[in-house]
Image (tube, grey):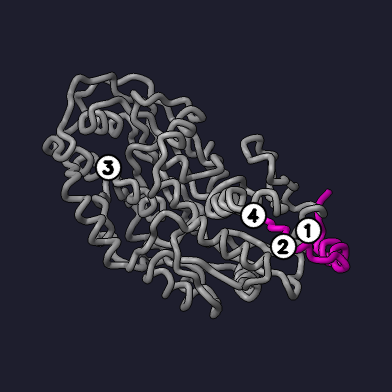
Amino acid sequence: MACSGLLARVLPSSQHIQPHKVVFSAYRGGGYGCNPKYVAEALLRLAKDKLDLVWLTREHDPSMPPEIRQVKWGSVAAAREWATARVWVDNVRTRRHVAKKPGQFYVQTWHGCLSPKPLEADIEPLLSQTYIRGAKQDSKDADLFICNNVFFEEKMRSSFWYDGPILRCGLPRNTVLINSSPDVRAKARAELGVSEQVGICLFAPTFRDDGENNSFGFRLDECACVLQQRFGMPFVFVLRLHPNAAAQSSELLVTDAMQTTAPQTSSAQPSATQGPTQASAAHASTAPVSIIDASHYADPMELLCATDVVISDYSSMLEDFALLGRPGFQFVPNAKQFESTRGFYYPLESRPFPLAYTEEELFNAILSYDETRWSAKRDEFFASIGFDDDGYGDEVVAKLILDVLEGRK
């Protein structure tokens, strides 16, 4: 049953707050992932028997811990959960159709705290009035934002229509990257159907404000050959679109720009620190390539753990991936257009990833990738933005929520 605005506001109005209930949502019912997932799991470790944890989701997820109740996103039942929870945890702007009550506490765990892509008030002319009203209400409702670096904390204060507390701590979702577990990598690779003998190149472009996706594609055949030449193993491609563009993934996979050939296994074993000199992959033999659509995979951090190389543009997934110390590449054929409409918070050249405007530049950047050089650049970049993340932000936020639930906050 759909939850109309009037019904959602009237039905829960007399419902009392349940003092140990925490309601989670990620990407507007998009699944069990991002910061809310890791806060929920920390709460289970710290106080499983004392809490009523609720996850609002569009689709039932059998992988979710059984201690978390799953409730249909957008339903009257979901409105009732919002209305009776002591604590809300979210990672995007969400219309809840339920007015926040005195005594409720809302933690906004924004889904990306580092990207060159301007957001919120900094791109206000690009946003609809509906979004702006909802964002302002969301920030008014929020009792706490979290952030793991000085640079983005300043952006939150200046651009998110928010003047409340910001907790400086690690991002909960980064725990799986900083404290990397082989089990997480194995789990994600098993779900993708990719063995450890095959490299994964995650292609993760961000959304376009105009909805255009023609600049997403490139020749996968030559790219796979180049990856194999440089890193000494065959590669498959995994496609991960931004949640705002995920519905386009099936369309993108059949565009002419996404060629579907890939290399045969090669005996070449380049150095781990210095790849071959610039060269063309045109002479490599080819065979059908696997392209796996993971745009709807619930937890992008698990995908990153499974990944060996990331190719992206302006997405924060590149900065996330840098925490694993693995190769990432910027492929930005539409950079001039993107900069003219949205701009950048910081120059693309300052990011700790090789920068390519054309396919040929991308292929040459892969072939000449020097891990020693780019490792030093990652360290410089994180120092420059005041990055501070110890990999335990999940427990920091969980303990704060427990303090709220127990009346200590």
Q: Are marks 3 and 2 in contact (CB under 8 Å)?
A: no
- Residue in the foreground of this view, choosing between 323 and 248: 323
Mark 2: give few (<14), some (14-19) or many (20+) Cα within 10 Å. Answer: some
**Disc 3 residue type?**
Glu
Disc 4 element: loop
Magenta segment range?
A: 1-25
Which residue, given by chain and number where applicable, does mark 4 sit on?
25
Name the front one of labels 3 and 2: 2
**Disc 4 residue type?**
Ser
| Residue 32 vertical position relative to residue 119 in the rendered view, above or below | above
- Residue in the foreground of this view, choosing between 291 and 97: 97
Which residue, given by chain and number where applicable, does mark 2 sit on?
96
Side of 22 relative to 166 (left or right): right
As measured in the structure, the alpha-carbon distance from the residue carrying label 3 to the one carrying label 2 is 43 Å
**Picture coordinates of residue 209 (x, y %)?**
49, 59
As measured in the structure, the alpha-carbon distance from the residue carrying label 3 to the one carrying label 4 is 38 Å
**Picture coordinates of residue 360 (x, y %)?**
22, 41
